[in-house]
Amino acid sequence: MNKIVFSGIQPTGELHIGNYFGAVANWVRIQNSGEYDATYCVVDMHAMTMPYDPPTLRKNTEGLFIDLLAAGLDPAKSTVFIQSLVPEHAELQWIFSCICSFGDLTRQVTFKEKSEQLEGRQDAFVSAGLFNYPVLQAADILLYRAGFVPVGKDQEQHLELSRTIANRFNRTFGHEYFPEPAVLATETPKLLSLNDPTRKMSKSLGPKSYVALFEDEKNVRSKIRSAITDTGEPASEIGAGALNLLGLLRATGRADVAAAFETEYATGEQRRYAPLKDAVADAMVDLTAGFRARRAEIAGDKDAIRRLMYEGAEKARVVASQTIKDVRRLVGLPRR
C-alpha cells in the first residue's frame, strides 16, 4: 500500500495558531507516527502567482522553513524542503499542463476568488501563473507519487484536479504510473477570528484576529483579553466567540478546563468570560513560549539552516529526478 504523504504551505508571512492546529500539528503527528513516508514543502513558487516583493518572498521562504522546524518537523524523520530548489516541480507542471484541459482550470474556484481580490487595485495584474497554479499543485503532489495528502474534510475538493491529472496521464500514456492521491483525513479544530468569530482565523483580517505562533506573552494576553465573546446570540446560548475560545483550550490539550467552563455556562445564570480568557491566555502563552525558544535556538545557527535547506532539497530530488526520468520516457521526451 502506498504510504507516501505530501503537503505544502505558502510563505505568506508569520505562522499563526490557525495554521499550526489546522495543518502543521497534524504533519508533526504523521511524521512521528512512523506509519508514513512524509514529505513537506515550502511552496515559494506558488507565492509568485500574486503580486509580491522579491526580497520579502526570499525572507518569508527562509523564515517559514525555520518556523516549520521550530514547530516540530524533523529532517531526520521527514523530507522538509523549499519547492524552488527542486526544479523537477516546474518540469512536471509543464508536462501536466499539456494534458490538463482549459475547462479543468476554469472550474477551479480559487482562481476566481483570488483574481477578484485584485480587482480595483492600482497594481492589479492577474497572471497566467494564477490560472495555472492548480497544475503546479498537482505536480507538487504527484512528483513524489504521494498516495495521501493530509487535509481537513472541507478541503477534499482541492485534490480532485490532482486525481484527474493522474488518471488522464495513466490513460493517455498507457501505464498505471501515478497513484490517484487520497485524503488523509485529519482532525482539525475550526479556529475562528478573535475579533470576528463569524469568520475563519486569517492574517487578512488584521493582527488582532489571530495569535502568531511565536508571539510574545504581552501581545498574546492583550489579544485574548480583547477577543469578542458574544455576537448577539440569545441569552440561552454561549456566544460564538466564547465557543471559539473553548475550542482553543481543547486544541492546546486542556479539554478538561474547557469542559469545566462549558458545565458552568450551561448551569449558571450569568456567564463570566473573564476567567475563560485568562485560561486561554495562559494556554497560548505556554504554547508560544516553547515555540519561541525553539525558534531562537534554530535561527541562531545560520550555517546549519542553510545546510538543512539544501540537504532537504537534495533528499527530495532523489525521488523527484527518478519520477521525471520515468515520465520523460513515457511521454516521448529524450533521455537526459
Image (spheres, rainbow, N blue to C red):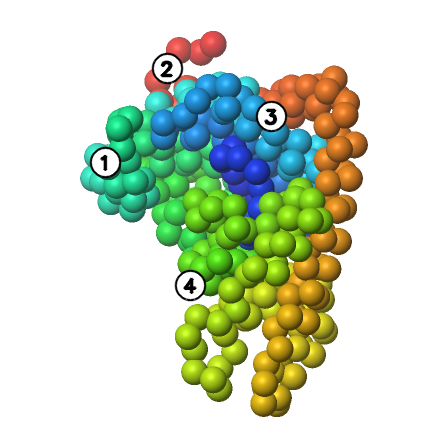
Q: Which residue is mark 3?
A: 62
Spatial CA distance of label 2 from label 1 is 43 Å
The mark that comes first in sequence, 3 or 2, is 3
Say what secondary structure mark 2 lies in.
Answer: loop
Q: Secondary structure at mark 1?
A: loop
Q: Nearer the viewer, mark 3 or mark 2?
A: 3
**What distance separates the C-alpha of mark 1 from that of mark 4?**
26 Å
Do the numbered discs 1 and 4 sit on residues whose CB atoms are within 8 Å?
A: no
Side of 91 relative to 80 (left or right): left
Mark 1, residue position? 120
Q: Nearer the viewer, residue 154 or 39?
A: 154
Q: Which residue is mark 4?
A: 198
For marks 3 and 1, give the one nearer the viewer.
1
Q: Residues within 10 Å of mark 3 (few under 14, many from 20)?
A: some
Note whether residue 286 is visible: yes
Cα gap from disc 3 to disc 2, whole angstroms: 34 Å
Mark 4 → mark 2, Cα distance in angstroms: 52 Å
